[in-house]
Amino acid sequence: MPVTLSQAFISNFLGSSPKWYKITILAFLLINPILFYFDPFVAGWALVIQFIFTLAMALKCYPLQPGGLLAIEAVIIGMTTPNQVMHEIEANLEVILLLVFMVAGIYFMKQLLLFGFTKIITKVRSKTAVSLMFCAAAAFLSAFLDALTVIAVIIAVAVGFYSIYHKVASGMSFGESHDQPQNNNQTLDEHENELEAFRGYLRNLLMHAGVGTALGGVCTMVGEPQNLIIAAQANWNFAEFAIRMSPVTVPVFFAGLLTCLAVEKFKIFGYGAQLPEAVHKILCEYADHEDAHRTNRDNMKLIVQAIVGVWLVVGLAMHLASVGLIGLTVIILCTAFNGVTDEHALGKAFEEALPFTSLLAVFFAVVAVIIDQQLFAPVIQWALSFEGNIQLVVFFIANAVLSMVSDNVFVGTVYINEVKAALLNGQITREQFDLLAVAINTGTNLPSVATPNGQAAFLFLLTSALAPLIRLSYGRMVWMALPYTIILSVVGLVTIETGFLVEMTQYFYDNNFLIHHSVQEVMNSGAASH
């Protein structure tokens, strides 16, 4: 039968997505203008929930298209303006450049990364030990690098492992040419069980590493984008930021590692998957094959990548330039000294990052709606109505809840600006401002691991090409992050609620570890930043 135009429209709309999903998105688009006409505030929250829905259904349809349609409609009906969207993109230009250049830069270092992590996987047989190593390594790197950079490294490594296994399981040898079919006596069921076990193993490592980026990212001013904003508003340098955060971040870090041990030992929340012996054998054979066939040119490539890796860590740790620009230098150095000069070879490095960069721009449009409709204003005013230590607890909880449903960079930025205004208006003291800055930073960084939309690194993992290969869905990420969410939130809250943060801060003051900034200094720093 011939296809009608209406049938063709439904068939083409959002491609191969389920019909119920297409109808749901169309319903959102029809309902939003009506809601906005009657109550802009309700319409704004409806848009936020709808956008989160598109993120949750990322495996049904990449969120860029449905989320983009919702954002376009929001601008058209007046929920925000193109200028406000552009303002948000400009304010987050460093994050965008990071995605464009740094993720691509990591692509040209994947030989070194695969070499190093393959050694870990093949030499360390204890799953618990490997999980701890991934979590701790991600935390350490995230304290000096951006979490997105670190998760991009881990994704590149996992893709390498999966590609190696898939190649051999498909009956190919390790060599680049003259591939011969492998003898494989496995039944189809045995192969499926082995593949599912390997997927579970990779899911475990990726989630441990993802949480590790949060554990390390909260510690220093370069760990997360909002950390830089908070440090600038408080006029803190690198060392002072780390010291002020330490009463919360140090206990939380060790609690995170203990959680990693517990979920692996008791095999709960989807953890405890073991690397199948057959897969371990394949990876060992791959490592031996690569070692045996590695030429001096290959060794030189590894040396160049290692040197560039040192520059990457030093450049970011000392904040010699913005993260995105350092990523651009990584691309130039790695390609120039390793002979990658073909335009098409360069283009492959950008394939992974650009769809997510586009999605992030759409997300900033949703953030613009949140700002214009003042969706968070009631919560902020409610939090400021408290005083003393209770105020710290309320700010931590308020930031935690909002960071779970929104972007932690946006939440941290909004809250620190409001607290800064309260300081300059004389509503709070400088000492309380310093303590609130710690509560805001830890509140946005730690509980936000609960959902992929809370942390950009988690969202990048969810929307990566690897996620569907290892069956890592939105719901599964939320479930696997749950034990970490509970433990990190509780430990962070306890350190603040018991007064431990106040006591340690006073101890640092008494021993001259911290500089007591005057309100005038903060005002001057704010004026300079503008």
Image (tube, rainbow, N blue to C red):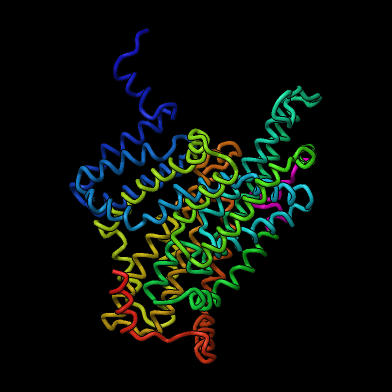
Please give the name of the residue rendered at 29% of the width and 17% of the height, measured from the top-left corner. 5
Q: Is residue 493 above or below residue 367?
A: below
Q: Quadrant of the C terminus?
A: bottom left
Question: Residue 30: x percent and y percent?
Answer: 26, 37
Question: Residue 127: x percent and y percent?
Answer: 74, 52
Q: Is residue 362 magenta?
A: no
Q: Is residue 272 magenta?
A: yes
Q: Which quadrant of the figure has residue 216?
A: bottom right
Q: Is residue 321 left or right of residue 170?
A: left
Please give the name of the residue rendered at 42% of the width and 55% of the height, measured from the top-left corner. 95
Q: Is residue 259 above or below residue 82?
A: below
Q: Is residue 85 left or right of residue 120?
A: left
445 and 57: which one is in front?
Answer: 445
Question: Residue 279: x percent and y percent?
Answer: 75, 38
Q: Is residue 287 above or below residue 394?
A: above
The secondary structure making up most of the magenta span is loop
Question: Residue 175: x percent and y percent?
Answer: 73, 30
Please give the name of the residue rendered at 53% of the width and 51% of the height, measured from the top-left corner. 330
Q: Quadrant of the N terminus?
A: top left
Q: Is residue 484 visible to the viewer in this orientation of the structure?
A: no
Q: Is residue 113 visible to the viewer in this orientation of the structure?
A: yes
382 and 138: which one is in front?
Answer: 138
Q: Is residue 299 left or right of residue 225?
A: right
> Which range of residues does the magenta coloring cover?
263-277
Q: Which quadrant of the figure has residue 201?
A: top right
Q: Is residue 12 above or below residue 481?
A: above
